[in-house]
Image (tube, grey):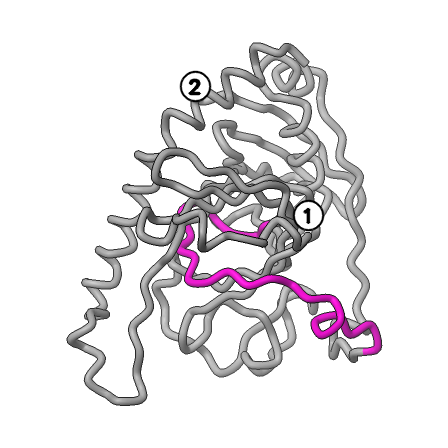
Amino acid sequence: MNKNVTDRTKNISDQNIGVRTDMHKEKCDTKEAAAGKTPAAASDSNSCVIRPIAYMHSSFVTKFGIPRQSGLTDARAEIVFEPEYASPEAFRGIEEFSHLWLIWGFSENTGRWSSTVRPPRLGGNVRMGVFATRSPFRPNNLGLSLVQLEKVEHRSNRCILHVLGADLMDGTPIYDVKPYIPYVDARPEAAGGFTDHTDWQNLEVRFTTEARQEAARSMPEEKLEELRQILELDPRPSYQKDPDRIYGLSFSRWEVHFRADEKILTVLSIEDRI
C-alpha cells in the first residue's frame, strides 16, 4: 500500500480530532437538554446524572454496519478523553491490562424502551425479554463493550486510548472505563442462553475489479482488512435477504456499495469522499 495513503489518513485524523470531539460533545449536550436531562432534573434521591468522560472516534459513521457485538473484528478506534479526565495520573497502570470494559451510551436512540425485542441472532422473528438480550432499546440506554487496549497516547491536554474490536458508532459518549480481569471476568462454563443454540455463518467477501482498484488507490491495507471483517459478518438487517438489493455502507471516509446472497457478499464499488 502506498505510504502516502497511510500518512494522509493519519494527518486528516490528527487535524480533526479536536473538532470532532467538540462536535460530539455539543451533540450529546443538545440531546440531553432536549430530553430534560440536567442536574436540576435529578430531584429524585434515587436518580443520578452522569456525564461523558470521553468520546469514541471510530470508522462507523452510521449505525448500519456496526458489528453486533464487540470483539468480532479488529477494527481500530480511539477513545478521546475530555481534558478534565485526561491527567496521566488517572491512567497509571492501565497499560498492564490487555482488555478494557467500556460503559457507554446509546446516544442515537430516539425511541422508547421496549419490554420485548427481536434479536438479530434469532432472525428478527422471535421476541425475547429486553433484559435477556443486548438490545439498545433499554430503559437507561447504557451499553457495555469489551475492547483490546493497543496503546495509550497523551497528546496536549487529551489522553487517547487506542483500542481494537469496538462496536461503537463514531461520537459515542463513554461514561466509564474499567480493566478486564480474567480471573473474575472469564467464565468459560457460563450458559449463553439462546446464543448457544444458534449458528452464525460468516459470508465470503469478494470485490469487483473496480472496487479493488479503488481500494488499492485510496484505502490503507489495514482499513481494507477491517472492512472485509465487517462485511463478512453480514451487516444487512436480518429481515432483508434480497440478493439483488444494493446496500450502501459509510465506513470512515469511504462509501461502500455491495450486494449479498446466502453465502457471498460482493463489493461493487468503493468511493473516497475526500
Residue under the point 71% across and 16% down: 209
Mark 2: few/some/many CA within 10 Å (<14, 14-19, 20+): few
Is residue 264 toward the left or the right of residue 25 in the image?
A: right
The amino acid pointed to by label 1 is Asp
| 250 is within the stretch colored magenta | no
Q: Which mark is residue 42?
A: none
Which of the two residues, 83 or 89, is positioned nearer the viewer here?
89
Q: Nearer the viewer, residue 138 or 115?
A: 138
107 or 201, nearer to the observer? 107
- Which percent across, then down, holds residue 85? 37, 53
User: Which-is-in-front pick, marks 2 and 1?
Assistant: 2
At horizontal 22% and vertical 80% (from top left) the residue drawn is 42
Residue 240: x percent and y percent? 61, 53
**Numbered range of the magenta stretch:** 166-189
Where does label 1 land, which residue? 234
User: Three-letter amino acid code at disc 2?
Assistant: Ile
Find residue 210 and report its image quarter.
top right
- Residue drawn at (30%, 34%), measured in percent from left and top? 19
| Mark 1 crowd level (few <14, some 14–19, many ≥20, 10 Å Cα) | many
Q: Quadrant of the N terminus?
A: top right
Residue 28, horizontal then vertical, whole percent = 29, 55
Image position of 256 (left or right of 262): left
Q: Secondary structure at mark 2?
A: loop
Residue 161 rendering spot, x and y as whole percentages: 52, 45
Quarter in which the C terminus is drawn: top left
In the picture of the structure, the residue carrying the numbered disc 2 is: 274
Residue 183 in the magenta stretch? The answer is yes
